[in-house]
Image (cartoon, rainbow, N blue to C red):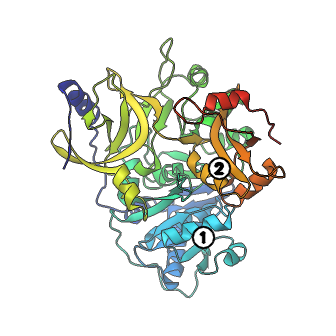
Amino acid sequence: MDRLRADDAAREAHRRINRTATPYPADQGVPELFARQVARGPEATAVVHGRQRLTYRELDRAADVVAARLAAHGTRPGDPVGVCVRRSTDLVVALLAVLKCGAHYVPFEASWPDGRLNGLFEQAGAGVLLTDRAGELTGRFPAATVVAVDTRPGDEASGPDVTVDPGTLAYVNFTSGSTGRPKGVPITHRGITRLVFGARYADLDSGAVVLHTAPVTFDAATFEIWGPLLHGGVCVLYPSQHLRCSELRTVLTEHGVTVVFLTTALFNTIVDEAPDTLDSVRTILTGGEAHSMRHIGAALARYGPGRLVSVYGPTECTTFATFYPVDALTDGEESLPIGLPIQNTRVYVVDGDELCAPGRAGEILLAGPGLSPGYLAAPELNRDRFLLRDVDGVPERLYRTGDRGALRADGVLMFHGRVDDQVKINGYRIELGEISYHLGRHRDVRQNFVTVVETAAGEKSLAAFVVTEDARCTPAGLRDYLSGLLPGYMVPGQIRFCTELPLSATGKVDRRALLATASADAR
């Protein structure tokens, strides 16, 4: 096993920040931990969606009914189950039912193109689809067994009697991939419990009331759903498809929400347009991309210390890896720290085969029970991204994030950008290479370059620059083409035509020159 070299300063700094071991139920899976809460408070409210409420007993029974139906259709421990359910109490029932079978859920959105959906199903190996819109989806998945989320007791036997090994998979999220093939990121039950037990970044207990707004395909949903439900708290589902500040304010106050997670872009919008929306919330978590110091400063002035927490983490480490309580800002501070590792998580800054002392930049590597077992069916990528190294005399399985950072003298981690072309927009992780790959396969596209542009207000969006073979090719036509291959959040809002892509002295596309000199309008 290769060893990471380190001088005394690097070794001591990493030892200090990585003393994060905290007791948590590492030997139990989600169904067992949920059952414990049912026994403790069967009539306590578990889930709220608009006027509908489910107690812990009701949620447990409903999940048993659906789990029995899944088992009757052949679902067995270890199986992947596709889940396409709108945000509702039925969504939580569906996820819990899959886990009660000892299976793992593979969530997706019905709005995704058919080609992408069938590719994901094939990659995950899913043969069963659990949904609240069976009539709409049956024809799109002819090879799948479609099971409706129906919580009315039927002729099926009682729910399966399965003991879930915490090391088995709980779900698979798919993230963008630079080769044009999305990456399947499996997460274990132990990854979930490591995230929500002994939390350093928020109070999670029987009094926690957590808002669920994230798409279930986005890993923030893991925290929003299982954070409260494995502690006897309340999961409040945002009632509408699209968020509005006025409705959000009402939901937060009426239900006494104590913890909310907001992507950076959404947080900025609220701070700008309706900062009083969050006045009643005890803990405001925000992250997903680099923060605007102007918005952070305005939020701190409004909400005061002790309430605002920045969180960071890739999907491969189960949602959150580090946290930074924003209690004060230093004059001249240009960027917000990533912070310190959360409980049962370790962070290393590595340059080559050497741990970096404070002040020296390197790639951010993560370790701990939150790590994914590895990408689905991607052995070469796994060998590149997941490493086994001797760190300070201890074997560590490490995940290379592709993010650069450096430790401050006090051990707090600072973000220094990416080492590749991955970006985050509105919390979604996007490989620019995946968009470029599909553009390049269009018959009329000779060259293309995909990048991120930023407005004066600090909002980010995707832009594609295209050299075309055919004058009849239009931006609208290319957007329609991409919409048939990619989720909407990956289709560039701007597509500009160029006669050529300017190159730098090193032969790479000169992004700055391209942005400055592109003469064709986006049509």
Query: Of 494 and 71, which appears nearest the observer?
Result: 494
Tell me where residue 374 appears, x and y as whole percent: 38, 58
Query: Of 511 and 336, which appears nearest the observer?
Result: 511
Please rate how many residues cluster around mark 2, counting C-alpha atoms within 10 Å: few if below 14, some from 14 to 19, many from 20. many
Lower position in the chain sequence, tag 1 or tag 2: 1
- Disc assigned to residue 490: 2
Please rate how many residues cluster around mark 1, counting C-alpha atoms within 10 Å: few if below 14, some from 14 to 19, many from 20. some
Vertical side of 327 occupied by 71: above or below: below
Tell me where residue 73 appears, x and y as whole percent: 52, 84
Query: What residue appears at the point 64 percent right and 42 percent down from the top-left corner?
Result: 449
Q: Check disc 1 and report the residue beneath it.
A: 118
Vertical side of 362 occupied by 54: above or below: below
Please tell me in which quadrant of the rendered image residue 380 appears.
bottom left
Vertical side of 99 occupied by 210: above or below: above
**Element type at mark 2:** helix
Query: What residue appears at the point 30 percent right and 23 percent down from the top-left corner?
Result: 358
Residue 455 in sight here: no
